[in-house]
Image (spheres, rainbow, N blue to C red):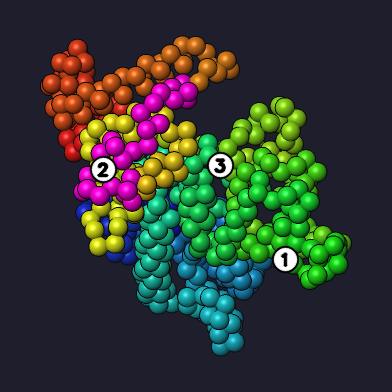
Amino acid sequence: MIAERHRRAQPEAADGEDSSSIGLSYQPRVLIAEDNEQTAQQLRSLLEGPLGLRVDVAEDGKQALDALKRNFYSLFLTDLKMPRLDGMELIQQIEELQIPVTVVVMTGHGSVENAVEAMRRGAFDFLTKPLDVDRLELIIRRALKERALRDEVVYLRDQLQMRQAFRNIITKNPQMLSVLELVNHIGHTATTVLIEGETGTGKELIARAIHQASSNLRPGPLVVVNCAALPENLLESELFGHEKGSFTGAIAQRKGRFEQAHGGTIFMDEVGEIPMAMQVKLLRFLQERVFERVGSTEPIEVDVRVIAATNRSLAKMVKQGTFREDLFYRINVVRIDLPPLRERPEDIPLLVRHFCEKYALPGEPPKEVSPAAMEILLNYAWPGNVRELENVVERACVTCREKTIGPEYLSPELSQPHATSSPFKVDLNRPLPELLREATAEIERRYIRKALRKTRGNVGRCAKICGLSRRSISAKIAEYHIDKAEMRET
């Protein structure tokens, strides 16, 4: 939210100039809540004129709260006595909703009690009517500078949290970078997320990144549950908990995973494995955020963000009648599709380097990987995706006694043709020309990468091998995001 405020509040003044006399590098936006039209217009003229601020006016407290929810304001000036919602109630709502705005209260009833109460509830300062223009201007300057400092702190903290959230996600693939951008965006919401991808593509890593990105909004824990690993007769108890004596072996009351995740996130891996009877109860929870423990009729309400993941297509399961359509739409609010490793081969050298560092033996530098071994890794289909690559590199780091990992330290099956070595699947739901374009692009990219590795990044020699002009090769290198420096290293 803070980053969005900074983006939207960029000044329209010339470069190097402030857009207002406040002394900030952006034009702050101010909301005035005042039911007296004459007073509101006088304030507006003062703030827009000498101070150069962007000003909106609300006629009552309810209108002001709606505006604060819709828009980003740096400063909020509010009267205490207003129809529908007074200033004190507004301050309380702002605090409960965690709206990042600095509040200055104005009132014609300048009692010490009102001033103390407004400040206790979170107001920055307090002014009495009739307003002293010089004091008002001084307070506005102080309030806006204080808000700018607060925004900067929150922005930097958010950036640090995002770096922590993404520290284990290694990629330069455009599709994966788009995924990370989406994670960053939805991190500031409580939206339900569905992650689809093959086994080993990093679904739990993405779920943890979403949770980390939303830690300001949702400071509670991340609770992970693998739906496929739980027996059907225990799944309900695991998710919703049970009361003592509710079934054989229930010797004490137990909180379920949803209750444990209150205020945070629950990650439901392999959600497609949930039996149909249990899907009904999960649907009810997603609709009402209320459930009962096994053996109890007392409703329990929790605040939980749900992230579901599956290595199967839930849309196809809906068509097959093995997954409820209404539950699918409840889960599929924001969907993230993770590409398999075979569709992001440019990430393989980065991941190999990362795993070599991760599994370096104590007191020894990380292993290097020979060009011949890297060629094998790049040409393998990786049906187990990143998880399989990590296992292969870990084994090689442990067994290799030299500084460089050669082909002899890789599993023999990596050099054998694999049944799924082609990244192109015949999908009759897609037109043939579209599949042909994808296949052509993939062959071009692999061919050019291999030629660049052979020529150690020399574009001219690569063009001769490919039978294309230097300009064409340069264009395709840019189009396919190929790193020439990486080709020289390998």
Q: Quadrant of residue 276?
A: top right
Query: In the drawing, does residue 218 fall left or right of residue 341?
Result: right
Kindly report the distance in space between the C-alpha atoms of the residues bearing marks 1 and 2.
49 Å
Q: Amino acid at mark 1?
A: Lys
> x%, y% of residue 116?
55, 85
Using the image as rendered, state which of residue 126 and residue 238 is in the foreground: 238
Badge 1 element: strand
Magenta residues span 396-424
Residue 11 visible (yes or no): no
Quadrant containing the C terminus is top left
The residue to which callout 1 is attached is: 255
Horizontal and vertical percent position of residue 211: 52, 56
Closer mark to the observer between disc 2 and disc 3: 2
Tell whether label 1 touches label 3 (CB within 8 Å). no
The residue sitting at 81% across, 64% down in the picture is 249
Q: Which residue is mark 3?
A: 195
- Report helix, strand or loop for mark 3: strand
Q: In this figure, which residue is indicated by the disc labeled 2?
A: 405
Residue 417, magenta (yes or no): yes
Q: Residues within 10 Å of mark 2 (few under 14, many from 20)?
A: many
Image point 28% across, 50% down: which residue?
A: 13
Q: Amino acid at mark 2?
A: Ile
Q: Is residue 199 left or right of residue 321?
A: left
Q: Earlier in the sequence, mark 1 or mark 2?
A: 1
- Disc 2 to disc 3, how far (Cα)? 35 Å
User: Above or below — where is 5 with respect to 249?
Assistant: above
- Nearer mark to the viewer, of 1 and 2: 2
In primary-sequence order, the first of circles 3 and 1 is 3
Q: Is residue 93 above or below residue 484?
A: below
Looking at the rendering, which quadrant does residue 65 occupy? Answer: bottom right
**Element type at mark 2:** strand
